Amino acid sequence: SRRRHRTAIQTELTPINMQSRLLQSPPHSSFPPRGTAPSCGLPFGGRRNFAALTLFSAVLLSQPTRAVPPAWTMFRGNSAQTGVAQSPLPDRLDVLWKFNAQDAITSTAAIAENAVYFGSDDEFFYALNFTDGKLRWKHHVKTFIQSSPTVIGDRVLFGDDDGVMHALDARTGKPRWTFQAEDRIVSSINHTTDRVLFGSYDGFLYCLNFTDGKLLWKYETQGRIHGTPAISQGKAFVAGCDEYLHVVNIDDGKPITRVSMESVSGASAAVTGSRVYVGTYGNTVRAVDLAAGRTLWSYEDPDRQFPFLSSPAVTARAVIIGGRDKRLRALHPNTGALLWRFTTGARIDSSPVVVGDRVFVGSSDGHLYAVDIAVGKEVWSFEAGAPITASPAVAYNRLVIGTLDGVVYCFGSRPRAPQQTENRP
């Protein structure tokens, strides 16, 4: 059965409930066999199609890497892979619309030009109307789509499990070009003005010409690449299954340096200044000092050793990351000291997104949570009734996320009926 995913998640879910809860805010090569880690073929015990796994990420909330419109055009929101939204969200969130695909959604949505884009395990890539969730077009690809899309100008790009990179016309869904890698593409696409970069399970970091999809260069690592490369100051940063963080010159694909992570990683690296934050399958979150070429700090829970497959969001005050031990944690960006932790009902493979003073994250317990970023207390939640491993996409005062049941939800604020007043003589 195509709906193999739910049986791999060992958690009990209640029937779908379209009501959300608002709490009082406090004063926060060959494909790996099924049942292995999504990027590195390690013991996994879960579904193989977890979108964009794990780790890292960092940038000052008050100092984004570059000015961007409040759209959400790629995984983690920007080229530095920081997971910090530029758009606000209302205090109270309602379900504005939902859309049903035919199989699991692990692809994190992209939002641009009044459209929502995402892929599904039903072998279709979708474009929906952002306003009401109605289908604009869909494109068939003959295999699963785990790669999260990236919108660049009038095109939307994504990879598939057959190793094909697709560039479609964002308005019509018509193909513009394709590129064939040697193994599947789960990595999302990052880009400069005229170049697109992504990783593949064949171990290569690829750089293509945006206009025609022609190969400009490819950089070989010694393991699969699952995560999205970060881009900063003309360099690409990629963490992979060879236990190294690689820094590559975007102009020519030549290596600049590499730093040992002491474990494989299935996720993206997030860059701020000379620091990179990354989580690993070796149960650690690491901060790498690129200037010194060494690890600045490494966090491992003393009591619960579990992998970090979620990509963290980072502000000046905290590195926030989900774990396979069901916990969302905030760590001090300078020391790695634990600031707070929030426990859900199941593993967290969804990557958190910071929106003002809240952080939003999905859990395999079937809930979307909003947590106070200062103290780690739940302030809102929504029960979707199916595991959530995709990550939130936040733009234009709305949040969009998909579930393993194949449902895409759009959250925002519904107009409230005016309160009636009692007139007295």
Image: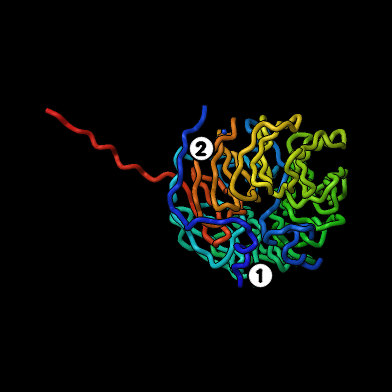
Q: How many badges with numbers are in the image?
A: 2
101 horizontally vs 164: left or right: left
- Which residue is found at the position 70% from the left and 57% from the top? 210
Q: How many neighbours does mark 1 have within 10 angstroms: few (below 14), some (14-19), or many (20 or more)?
A: some
Evaluate if marks 2 and 1 touch, with contact meaning CB atoms under 8 Å apart: no
Q: To which residue does mark 2 refer?
A: 379
- Residue type highlighted by circle 1: Thr
- Residue type highlighted by circle 2: Val
Percent of width and height locating residue 415 = 36, 44
Image quarter (top left, top right, bottom left or bottom right) of the N terminus? bottom right
Could you say whether the residue bearing mark 2 is in a helix, strand or loop? strand
420 horizontally vs 291: left or right: left
Q: How many neighbours does mark 2 have within 10 angstroms: few (below 14), some (14-19), or many (20 or more)?
A: many
- In the rendered view, tell whether residue 129 sits above or below residue 232: below
Percent of width and height locating residue 63 = 65, 32
Residues 107 and 74: in front is: 107
367 horizontally vs 33: left or right: left
Percent of width and height locating residue 322 = 66, 44
Percent of width and height locating residue 214 = 76, 62
- Label of residue 143 in the image: 1
Could you say whether the residue bearing mark 1 is in a helix, strand or loop? loop
Residues 328 and 242: in front is: 328
Between disc 2 and disc 1, the foreground one is 2
Give the image quarter of residue 302.
top right
- Which residue is found at the position 55% from the left and 51% from the top? 111
Q: CA distance from mark 2 to mark 1?
A: 38 Å
- Asked whether residue 191 is in view, the answer is no
Image quarter (top left, top right, bottom left or bottom right) of the C terminus? top left
- Which residue is found at the position 59% from the left and 45% from the top? 344
- In the rendered view, tell whether residue 240 sits above or below residue 35: above
Q: Which of disc 1 and disc 2 is earlier in sequence?
A: 1
